[in-house]
Image (spheres, rainbow, N blue to C red):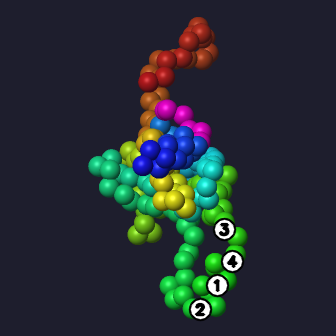
Amino acid sequence: MNKKIFISGLLLAAIFFSAFAEPKYISPNNDGVQDELVIPVKISDKRYVQAWSLVIMDSQHNVVRTIENKIARPSKMTFKAFFKQLFSPKQGVAIPDTVTWNGAMNNGETAPDGIYYYYITATDDNKNVGKTKEYEVVIDTVAPDVELAQPGDKIFGEGAKAALKIK
């Protein structure tokens, strides 16, 4: 029992997640500027990592998007496939250097503006699960509104002013 807790603790400690404490901001409106959240990831374990996932939640902590990779197991196991699997070397899933979220939810729609939270989990072949803490990302697609008022007094010319007030 203690060994399983220790291995689980190692997996949790081995998930390295380089994100800062301050929230990230994205604007998934396809204008080419901050359209996606790119998360650098490094997962390591003494065993084989069988699955990892990036979970995105809305401000009420409802899961809106899950991006994952796991080893697919065959649904039908034939005699030949069983022995092939038995003698093939064990391997884990590929761990990417970065995971990207483009603001899309599981239903394919773009997530509305607001605050979202995300974390990454990893599972090894002994079913130990490690999880990062939750990080914040803000979706903001509304452009700022700027209004310029023409100054009423004379600025240039005779008796030119050195300062210009902008409201």
Magenta-highlighted residues? 16-22
Residue 21 visible here: yes
Residue type at mark 4?
Phe
Q: Residue 83, which numbered label?
A: 1
Q: CA distance from mark 3 to mark 4?
A: 9 Å
Of residues 147 and 154, the one nearer the viewer is 147
Q: Main secondary structure of the magenta part?
A: loop
- Residue 69, quarter of the rendered image: bottom right
Residue, disc 2: 79
Residue, disc 4: 87
Q: Residue 129, image x and y in percent?
A: 47, 53
Q: Is residue 152 left or right of residue 96?
A: left
Which is nearer the N-term, disc 1 or disc 3?
Answer: 1
Q: CA distance from mark 2 to mark 3?
A: 19 Å
Q: Residue 37, image x and y in percent?
A: 55, 50
Q: Is residue 66 above or below residue 15?
A: below
Of residues 64 and 159, the one nearer the viewer is 64
Q: Residue at x 57, y 70 (%)?
A: 71
Q: Is residue 166 above or below residue 159?
A: below
